[in-house]
Image (cartoon, rainbow, N blue to C red):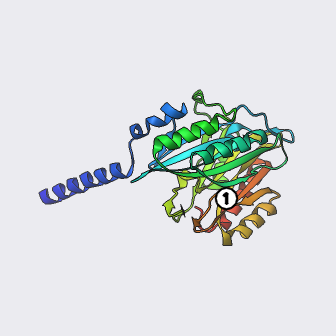
Amino acid sequence: MDFLRRASLFFLVCFSIFSNAQQPAADEWASVPQILGKSGKLQDGIYKVSFPRSDLNVHIGATKVEAGTGLGSWTAFRKTSNGVVSDGDLVLLSSELNPVISALQAGGFEITAIHNHLIGEEPQVMYIHFFARGDLAAVLATLKKALAETKTPITEAKSQPTATFPDQKTIETALGKAGAVNGNVLAFGFPRTHPISMHQEMLPPAMGMATAINFQTSPKGVAATGDFVLKEDEVQRVVAALRSGSILVTAMHNHLLDDEPRMVFVHFWAEGDAQTVAKTLRSALDAASTTK
């Protein structure tokens, strides 16, 4: 028994050391808020900073799109032996788009996609996806210059009290998991179950490789938007499932370049009864065989 206790203690110590090595401490990212002006959150070794476009007043019909529903810029970082890998997505007005492109490219960033995510919104918003590798300070300096070309609010948002969302239980039951309430938004993430890389650099789910579904209230009940992260052979099944419930398919495109495997991102917009919308989205999740 004494041997077993010593062996168990040895395993726990080794596991703890391994876990700490795999998960960089938050203080390793102290330069991020110092340079960008805003702190982020550490999840599974990925440090992610969000910049909701709360300055924008975007409507689809009679529904005001919440910043946390479909207007959230973000950037994520993963430590490597040569610095960091970073990717992200910036929400931009048309007038901001090309100045941001120039600022990112001047810092050596790759522009991996430029496109819409929504449809019928006023004013029109565009989304630019990027990828970068190198020294953390240099990457942050480029991001700061790019954000300076926009009116994106940088200041820390006031903490939102934990709350419930209308029809939250109905939605969670239909989708089969608990969501996260952040202000007026109920958010869900469904990570892919296989590795995804760009330029042979691994991009974990927290770096945008998880299907995202966000709910907010609307005059019709709820509105939902987000994107499905799919392999090519899953796309048609998911699109058919969305349309079977009259959910609008708003965009289908890449977010990455030189990705392995090739991934397609399908965006959507839905409004209506919470249970009906959630059940249709559940059927679309089921159609994506490797999204859990």
- The amino acid beneath tag 1 is Phe
Kindly indicate the quadrant of the structure image that contains residue 192. Answer: bottom right
Corner quadrant of residue 52: top right
Looking at the rendered image, the quarter that the N terminus falls into is bottom left
Residue 100 horizontal/vertical position (percent) = 67, 42
Front residue of 165/189: it is: 189
The spot of residue 154 in percent (x, y) is: 61, 31
Residue 239 position in % (x across, y down)? 76, 64
Q: Residue 90 appears at what percent x and percent y?
A: 66, 44
- Badge 1 crowding class, 10 Å Cα cut-off, few under 14, some 14 to 19, many 20 or more, is many
Q: For numbered disc 1, what is the local secondary structure?
A: strand
Q: Can you say whether 166 is above or below 128 in the image?
A: above
**Residue for badge 1:** 228
Residue 9 seen in the figure? yes
In the depicted structure, whether residue 144 falls above or below residue 243: above
The reply to whether residue 167 is in sight is no
Left or right: where 22 falls relative to 160: left
